[in-house]
Image: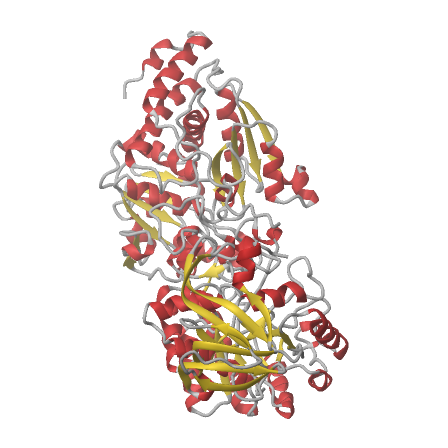
Amino acid sequence: MTNPMTTHGSGAGIELAHEIAAEEVETMLVPRQHLLDLDDLSVADITDLLDSAEGMLEIASRDNHKTPALRGKTIITMFFENSTRTRVSFEQAGKILGADVINVTASASSVSKGESLLNTVKTLQAMSIDALVVRHPHSGAPYFITNHTDASVVNAGDGTHAHPTQSLLDLFTVRNHVGDLVGKKVAIVGDVLYSRVARSDIIAFQKMGAEVVVSCPNTLLPDEWQWDSTLGSETGFAGLRLAANVDEAVDSADVVMALRIQQERQDSGHLPSLREYSDRWGINSKRMELANDGALLMHPGPMNEGVEIASDVAHGFQSVVEEQVRNGVAVRMAVLYTLCAPGKSARIGGGDASNGEETKS
Amino acid sequence: MAARKLAITGGKVIDPAQGIDRVADVLISNGSIESVTDSSTGSSYDGYESVEASGKIVSPGFVDLHTHLRDPGQEWKETIITGTRAAAHGGFTTVCAMPNTDPVQDSAAVVGDVMRRSAADGVVRVLPIGAISIGQHGKQLALMGELADAGVIGFSDDGNPVTNANLMRQALAYSVEFGMPIINHAEDKKIGAGGVMSAGAVATRLGLAGVPTEAETAMVARDLHLADLTKARLHIPHISTMGSLAALRSAKECGVDVTAEVTPHHLTLSDEWVFGLKGEVPEAVGSAAYDTNTKVNPPLRSREEVEAVIDALNEGLIDIIATDHAPHAATDKVCTYDEAAHGINVLETAFSSVFALVDAGKISVVRLIESLTAGPAAILRRDLGSLKKGFSADVAIIDPGSKWIVNPEQFESKSVNSPLAGVELTGRVVTTIYQGETVFDLSVVNETGARS
């Protein structure tokens, strides 16, 4: 897209940036209340968000990147798991847009005193907040929260289910390099069973027309996924190819994504050892040679260098890992703006019934 | 009991224990069944209070082999009073109380307490089940002889599988003396550790850890072999997998003394209910998903598995229906799926939910009633579950055409954890009679709008 914001350069006034951001973005985006996963977004919805993120990336890269686009809005990041990049990325995105951002972590909140998720949400809800950015170890926690708050809810990673802003930034990063994703081959290598990034990325890249192939030890696939096969529609991931080995997956790939392997997979018996995993599934320069020329190497972070990804390629010419982080701020700005933009009265699907909030007479 | 004389007239009497399936009158006096006699037009019985039942089904009161009354110890979820009222509401006149109370029903003292308070406060019959192991810890056999003397009808560590195969073997062998079944919650907790729903496409889409069916099947197979070894009675609770059914079939063919139950939810709900759309499969996971009221152990299985347990119930491979009524408070269910407690509130929807299978032509109404009356009574080896002369006058009267929408707020149960909230069901228990006394009457409830 052509982006008039770039013409203002770093000298543009803050108010001007705000107006442009508001007008430009508002006309492009369909208002919605929550971002929980990408499965309920259309290709057009995703494209709009990515287009918007381009403008946001420009704003974020200015010397003075503060805009008042979301001035007067309050965003709470509520992280029940440790995180560096995602939490800071959301905070930075909110702050660039001028929102007040409050960070709540489980260990430093009443959660550590045993307060339930329901009561934590109700407590925050009572303080006039506009958006809740939630990271939680339990799949579905952000969905649960939507039933108990009027605020917009952004899923910043729930259990082993979804991580939609990660997938948006992955799409954004790849699009910036290869353009249209239709027909491109994306290889995802790693802990598919436990990875929310894998699930959301499979949905995201397939939705945008890419061919997705995953590879990992059979212990890290869901039981109903058959090794060396292509999934049918009954799985909910129709067309996903499960490669027989990592070389088949990486062969002629346009994108290679390595997923984090945690020590606990070895402890729980899913893997004989991290070293064997590294030998058989680790992404290294030799394996990257199988990929297409110009293939991108991605990793959602944090990386275990020397396990799922070799240090030389992690920081090599094909790596876009740091770019992913930079783009993450822009994509999250687009998401927060979409959800919290001033005067958005046309929220989609607002006011869900308070499911499960049962009382007994 | 009071000297009340009752004539239930004009209803279709279905009493599988006697092979009765015809329009007849049921006469009750002194709390016992006097007779089942052919209706004659305008028949009236002098000195009998009349209950007009034409168009209705008159069944023996239902017998539930698997109920969690939560009393003593978790009275905020259910009590003997609310649990037995819920039973009456659902047509049950006998419930067998699982021992996972606090303290556990592993001694004559606790069992005696439950029996005394049930007799005093309960509106239907409560038969306690004793623990297999002390504290249900799976370490040391409970005092099974003392428990048998105190009046238990079987032994179970329900909720806790007996993991130690030798303890299971000894429990089975020791129980032979009492002629009572060992009821083992069959689940190898190491297979699918951490799982919160059945493994499969739904679990994968929702990112929930899945328990494979083999976690149940493996332990069912072990238990069947141990029952064969010991020649003891084994009762398999809430059977839910095709693998378990195959093992059960093979064991029955070999003469193993085994019976099995299936729950109403495993007969009617699949894992797709976890999407929160009453069994619909959505394009995109929505806010209704992760319906914690669908979290139960064993978990709701695939549709294929559901069809298999229906077929097995139909042919008699599965002997009976039991509810596994498991009330839980809101704090146990208004939370994430991982945090939620296992269990469904079943007693008051049990008959109606399975009656949908009758309407769909998948099971006969006679087999359904047999599964709730003669079947469990045979496992208990008690004079229950039939309208035979001299039996306790326990009767459920059902309106097969009555449509109703499940509203857990109207349950007699203290808890509301039903995935069927808002679902329309057909066929409803309208009157429940226990020992000749009316303990539930829908018309009275409707008139007064009362729930106590």
Residue A99 point in image, percent of width and height: 52, 21
* Front residue of B223 and A246: B223
Q: Is residue B367 visible?
A: yes
Residue B238 point in image, percent of width and height: 50, 72
> Looking at the rendering, in which quadrant would you find the C terminus of chain B?
bottom right
* Front residue of A41 and B322: B322
Residue A223 point in image, percent of width and height: 40, 62
> Looking at the rendering, in which quadrant would you find the N terminus of chain B?
bottom right
* Front residue of B274 and B348: B348
Up/down of B289 relative to B445, above or below: above
* Residue B244 placement, left or right of A290: right
Up/down of A280 relative to A169, above or below: below
In this figure, which colouring scheme has been used for the structure?
secondary structure
Residue A196 point in image, percent of width and height: 44, 46
The quarter holding residue B65 reads: bottom right
- Residue found at x 38% / y 73%: B310
* Residue A58 placement, left or right of B194: left
Q: Is residue B416 visible?
A: no
Total tally of numbered discs in the picture: 0
* Front residue of B53 and B43: B43
* Residue A282 placement, left or right of B229: left
**Residue at the extreme right:** B109
The quarter holding residue B439 reads: bottom right
- Residue found at x 68% / y 39%: A110
